[in-house]
Image: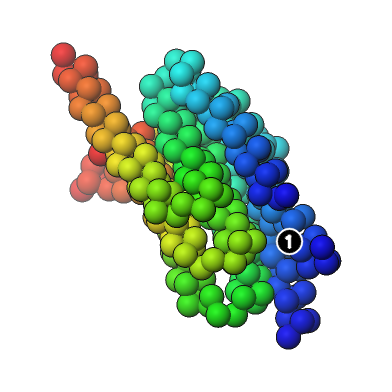
Amino acid sequence: MDSLTIILFVAAGFILLALLLALYRFIKGPHTTDRVIAFDVMSIAGIALIAMISLFSSRIIYLDVAIVYGLLGFIGVIIIAKYLERSL
Amino acid sequence: MIQLIIAIVLGMIMILMAGVAIYHKKLKVAIIAAGAVSLFASILYILLAAPDVALTEASIGSGLSVVIFFYVLNKIRKYDTEK
Amino acid sequence: MEALKYIGAIISLFGSIFLFLGALGLIRMPDVYNRIQAGTKASTLGTILTLLGIGLIMPSWGGKLFILIMFVIITNPVSSHVLSRAAHHIGVNMYKNTVTDLLEKDENNTNSKPEKQ
C-alpha cells in the first residue's frame, strides 16, 4: 500500500464524514428547508463518493451512474422547492 | 478495505433514514427520507459491481417516485384548502 | 508522470476537505439562508476539485469527468437559488442580527408601483 493509496483513502474518509454531518442536520433540522439543504449536500457528496469508488475499482462505467445521480438530485430539489412555494 | 468501511457507513445512514421515513410526523419529510434511502442504496449497488441496477434504482426510486409523491401531495393539499 | 498522480491525489484531498467543511458549516450556521450559502458554495468547489484530481490521476477519463464538472457547475447554483427563493416566499425567519433584506424591499417596490399610478 503506497502513499498515493493512503492519500485517496483519507479523501474518501473525509467524504464519509461530510455525509454523516449532513445526516445529523437532516435528523435534527427544525424546518423542512433545512432537510432539503441536507439532502442536496448529501447528493453532491454522493457524486464525489461515486467518482472515488470508480477510481478505486478503475472502471469508467461507474461514472455514468454519477451523471444520472446528479441529474436526479437536481430534479428532486427543484420539485420540492416548487411544492414548498405552492406553485407546482 | 475502504470498500468495507464505505459499505458499513452507508448501511448505517440507510437504517437511520428509514427510521426517519417511518416515524416522522410530517409527510413531506418522510418522502424526502425515502428518496435519500434510494440514493444510498444505489451507491451500495455500485459497491456490489452492478451499475445497471444502480442506474435503475437511482432513476426510479429517487426520481420518479419522489416526483409522483409530491404531485399527489400537491393535489391533496389543493383539495383540502378548497374544501 | 508519477508526480502528476501525486498532485492529483493532493488536489482530490483538498476537494474532500472542502466538502467536509461545507457539511460542518451546515451544522454550525444559525440560519436557513446561511446554511444554504455554506452548504452549496463549499460543496460545489469541493466536488469540482475532487473530480479534477481524479482527472489528473486517470487522464484518459477526461471527457466524461469534464461533462460531470460542467453539469455540477450549471445545476448546483440553480437549485440553491430556487430553494432560497422558496424559503423566502414561505416566510422562514431570519437570524436576529441580519442587517438587510434586499429581496423583500425589491418586491415591495414592484408591488407598490401600480398603486402609485
Query: Quadrant of residue B78 in the image?
Result: top left
Query: In the image shown, does A81 or C91 lie closer to the viewer?
Result: A81
The kind of residue tagged 1 is Leu
User: Residue B21: x, y in percent?
Assistant: 46, 23
Which type of secondary structure does the marked residue at label 1 adopt? helix
Instruction: Report the number of numbered marks.
Output: 1
**B81 shown above or below C110:** above
Residue found farthest to the bottom: C1
Residue under numbered circle 1: A8
Which percent across, then down, holds residue C95? 61, 34
Q: Is residue C12 above or below residue A45?
A: below
x and y percent of residue C14 in the render?
73, 62
Classify residue C15 as left or right of residue B83.
right
Q: Quadrant of the N terminus of chain A?
A: bottom right
Front residue (pair A11, C95)? A11
Label 1 neighbour load within 10 Å: few <14, some 14-19, many 20+: many
Look at 60% across and 80% down and name the residue there: C59
The chain letter for the residue carrying disc 1 is A
